[in-house]
Amino acid sequence: MTTNDTITQARAGAEQVLARTQETTRRVADEVRAKTEPTAEQLADAVNELIAWSRRSTPRSPLDIAEVRSGIEARLSPYLVVSRGELARLESRVEDLEAELATVRKVADKAARAAKKTGGAKKPSAAKPEA
């Protein structure tokens, strides 16, 4: 046998060993994956556990949010920051006052026009009525 034949045989033997090793590795990997892959029941249990945890922690959330909100409001109050609710209330009050002022102006204008027609009626006295 020549050197080339020996090398060829060694190479063929190495390829066979490599093919068997790859096949064995794939088989072992498939077995490991099958054993470690979660089943539908395990996934359902995990989901149910997450839902239960969420429900247990939910009642605390409003308290935490309220605490955070009050902390923020306490820190911002020195800077005279107005909340949206307070701003809406103040805007509504200003609109009401503007409407009231418009009504008073209309009445005053009407009274002034009536006074001009009658030739200057007496101005109402500033004295307080007797009780």
Image: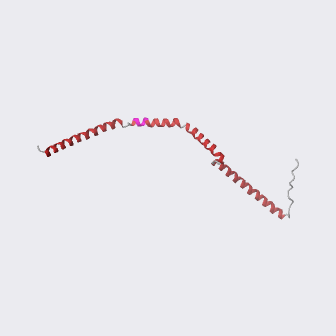
Q: In percent of the image, x 16 and y 44: which residue is there?
A: 7
Q: Specify whether 63 is left or right of 49.
A: right
Q: In percent of the image, x 63 and y 44: which residue is there?
A: 75
Q: In percent of the image, x 81 and y 60: which residue is there?
A: 111
Q: Position of residue 27 (x, y in %)?
A: 28, 38
Q: In percent of the image, x 78 and y 58: which residue is there?
A: 107
Q: Position of residue 52 (x, y in %)?
A: 49, 35
- Residue extending farthest to the front is 3
Q: Main secondary structure of the magenta part?
A: helix
Q: Specify whether 94 is left or right of 32.
A: right
The answer to which image quadrant residue 116 occupies is bottom right
Please name the colour scheme applied to the rendered image: secondary structure
Q: Position of residue 93 (x, y in %)?
A: 70, 51
- Residue extending farthest to the left is 1
Is 115 magenta? The answer is no
Above or below 95: residue 45? above
Which residues lie in the magenta part?
41-45
Q: Specify whether 70 is left or right of 127.
A: left
